Amino acid sequence: MEQLEKRMVEKTHVSLEGVSKSFSDRSVLKRINLQIERGEFIAVVGKSGCGKSTLLRLIAGLEQTSEGIIKMNGTALSSLNKYSRIMFQDGRLLPWKRVIDNIRIALPKEEEKKAIETLQHVGLGDRLYDWPRKLSGGQKQRVALARALVHDPELLLLDEPLGALDALTRIEMQDLIEELWKDRGFTAVLVTHDVEEAVAIADRVLLIEDEIISLDQKINLPRPRHRTQLDFSIYVEEILARIMKRKPYTEQMAKRDMETVSV
Amino acid sequence: MLPSIKGSNKQLIPWLVPMLLLVCWQYLSWVGIIPQRILPAPLEVLQAAITLLSTGELYEHILVSLGRALTGFLIGGSIGFFLGLFNGISKYSELLFDTSIQMLRNIPHLALIPLVILWFGIDETSKIFLVALGVLFPIYINTYHGIKSVDKDLIEMGRAYGLKGKALFFIVILPGAMSSILVGIRFSLGVMWLTLIVAETISTHAGIGYMAMNAREFMQMDVIVLSIVLYALFGKLSDIIAKYFEERLLKWNN
């Protein structure tokens, strides 16, 4: 009981302390320190191969740290993170199980009703008994999302889940994820290569570069966010500029304007 | 583009060629182009079947042959399946056994007939042993390969969602390997009949092969042809059964 109270009170949900990861002799992440608050939505961006997926897999407990520790609710992870559920880029549905049975794979018998409810939440209440092969890419990811959420995880890990979807489906899915996050109040970490997606959905955007977190940007925009807002574009442009190692377009513009004035 | 074929026709068309062959064969026998001593007419073969059935002889031979085939298949099939399973799942088991199995696999099992006769004599054991040995390797190879080629990402997903041990095996690994295992079963059913035909010509006192060898002694061409037809029918029947299981177990893929 006391422990539970402590857990509820504790603000920091996930914390990485001096986490390094290397594969054989290739170092991917170096002494990462990171605190994620309960209920926060974090987006991790970076060029492909920068280690952002590795960071997520470390938090999920699918990989073990080479150095440092990852704490979940204040206790160090030793293997699989049982408080988290992960959603993969390629969905990874079992093709030989119907939609509803894909949701149920690790669900205790007495909670089977929840499978149907969760599928209704993601808008697939009418596809319960279809084979995954019959679904579109977006629908498959909805099933994968429902499969992750049916366990009511405290922490939802999203590994580029929308990367393979077309632009319209992607926006639809972003809205769905945001809505479910607001409803259910889980903590979320989204890995993405789409800076606009990160700014649209996250409280904080992290940039991983040269094995470290080189940028930790709070996004102070009210929700729902609109991509056409000037502030929104400035955030996107600034983060993009950091990734591409060039000056933000806004600054360049300002500078050019100044030059014209001075002439 | 072919016009779509109606359901009932779809069932009938595959039998057109065999039927036509039978009719031609019967006709050629009637007019005397095919001599009786070379090949008896289909109706005579049917007559032989009816006679043998009425005495209960045919029934007994079929039962004996089916018994041998099934016993051998079950023994060899289970050994092959479990070896494939263990070697597919465990690295140690694979290291320990796979090389030896691959060596044994390359010996044609029918080459062992002289040895098998010396070991087990000419009674049931030798036939069942040969069938089991023949069936073992196709099932082993395909099970092993099937388990090895299960999508690693799906296994990782299963683990990430808390599946392990038995649950992981039955929910992810076995269904993932199933199509390959069924290919092995279908292939080994062919091997099963082939082995049985050869094994039953080693001296026995019952079975379809014995019936054929015995008929040879008395120049009963109709009985010889009947036993060949029986093998063809059983081959087709086992194929139908295998196909049925394929359709049931792999219906997610249709």
Image: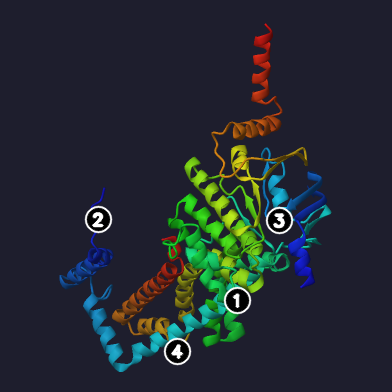
Q: For mark 4, name the chain.
A: B
Instruction: Please give the name of the residue rendered at 50% of the width and 57% of the height, measured from the top-left corner.
Output: A122
Give the quadrant of the N terminus of chain A: bottom right
Indicate which label's residue lies in the foreground, 2 or 4. 2
Q: Is residue B69 left or right of residue B171?
A: left
Of circles 1 and 4, which is in front?
A: 1
Give the residue displayed 23% in from the left and 72% down from the top.
B35
A161 to B118, vertically: above or below: above
Share a chain, discs 2 and 4? yes
Q: Which residue is mark 1?
A: B79
Q: Nearer the viewer, residue B84 or A141?
A: A141
Between the residue at mark 1 and the residue at mark 2, the CA separation in whole angstroms equals 44 Å
Chain where mark 3 sits: A
Which residue was labeled with disc 2?
B4
**Chain ID, mark 2:** B
Residue at numbered disc 3: A38
* Amino acid type assigned to the residue bearing label 3 in the image: Arg
Q: Which residue is mark 4?
A: B205
The residue lying toward the viewer, choosing from A236 and A224, is A224
- The residue at the point 60 percent across, 83 percent down is B118
Q: Nearer the viewer, mark 1 or mark 2?
A: 2
- Is A12 positioned to the left or the right of B239 in the image? right
Mark 4, secondary structure of its residue = loop
Q: Are marks 1 and 2 in contact (CB under 8 Å)?
A: no
Q: Mark 4, mark 3: which one is toward the viewer? A: 3
Q: Nearer the viewer, residue A260 or A27?
A: A260
The answer to whether residue B178 shows anywhere in this view is no
Between residue B173 and residue A10, name the one nearer to us: A10
